[in-house]
Image (spheres, rainbow, N blue to C red):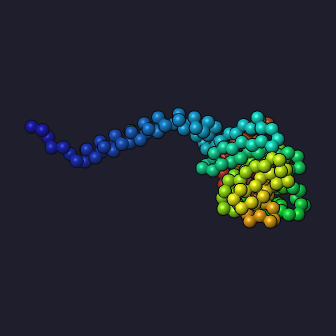
Amino acid sequence: MLEPQNPNRRKLLLRWVQGFSITGLGFLAYPFFKVLMPGLSEDGFLEVDYQELAIGEWKSVSWLGRTVIVFKRGVGWTQTAEASGLKDPLSQASSQPQFAQNPERSHRTDVFVFYSNCTHLGCEVAIHPDQAAAPIQCPCHESRFDGAGRVFAEAVASRNLEVPFYRPIAANAIRLERVNPSDGIG
Ligand code: FES
């Protein structure tokens, strides 16, 4: 004679099977994830090598659901801090790590790393290397930014472009890191 099935045992068994299935799917998906984001480590870093960039060129990477642009800028593509016509020349009211709170807004004078979203309504900005005085521009409402992402006074955007937290790790490579800029690290 068959024993009546214990409903608690069936539930327990079902949970075990579900648990193993989810873990197995995670292991299967991991290699594909690594292929899609080759520089992303388990610790949440993203290493970006930009040695192929010439002046006026840039590369985009996906970082924490947003696009980050690494832009190789030319000499004189950032307005001086004294330059009139910038809303926030020293970036005192802008979102950035401490290391970027200066006229260059970067670890290096020739490279600018920034989030691609315009600070007005979030459109993706475009780069115009042929317009050195305002090489970053927003196609939506024509806000213009200098080579350090500092917004010009006549723009509808009120703040400079955001700078993510990163560290130089080689002559032409950086590592984006998951750090809150308000932590003051940098
Ligand atoms: S979204 Fe960029 S100017 Fe409006």
Q: Position of residue 96 (x, y in %)?
A: 73, 56
Q: Quadrant of the N terminus?
A: top left
Q: Position of residue 61 (x, y in %)?
A: 66, 43
Counting the numbered discs, the total is 0
Q: Position of residue 168 (x, y in %)?
A: 76, 42
Seen at 38% across and 42% down, the residue is 19
Residue 122 visible in the snapshot: yes
Left or right of residue 34: residue 7: left
Q: Which residue is at the front of the view, 89 or 147?
A: 147
Residue 107 visible in the snapshot: no
Q: Which residue is at the front of the view, 2 or 76?
A: 76
Seen at 67% across and 46% down, the residue is 177
- Residue found farthest to the left: 1
Seen at 81% across and 47% down, the residue is 129
Seen at 33% across and 44% down, the residue is 15
Q: Position of residue 162 (x, y in %)?
A: 72, 56
Q: Which residue is at the front of the view, 141 or 40?
A: 141
Left or right of residue 12: residue 146: right
- Name the quadrant containing residue 173: top right
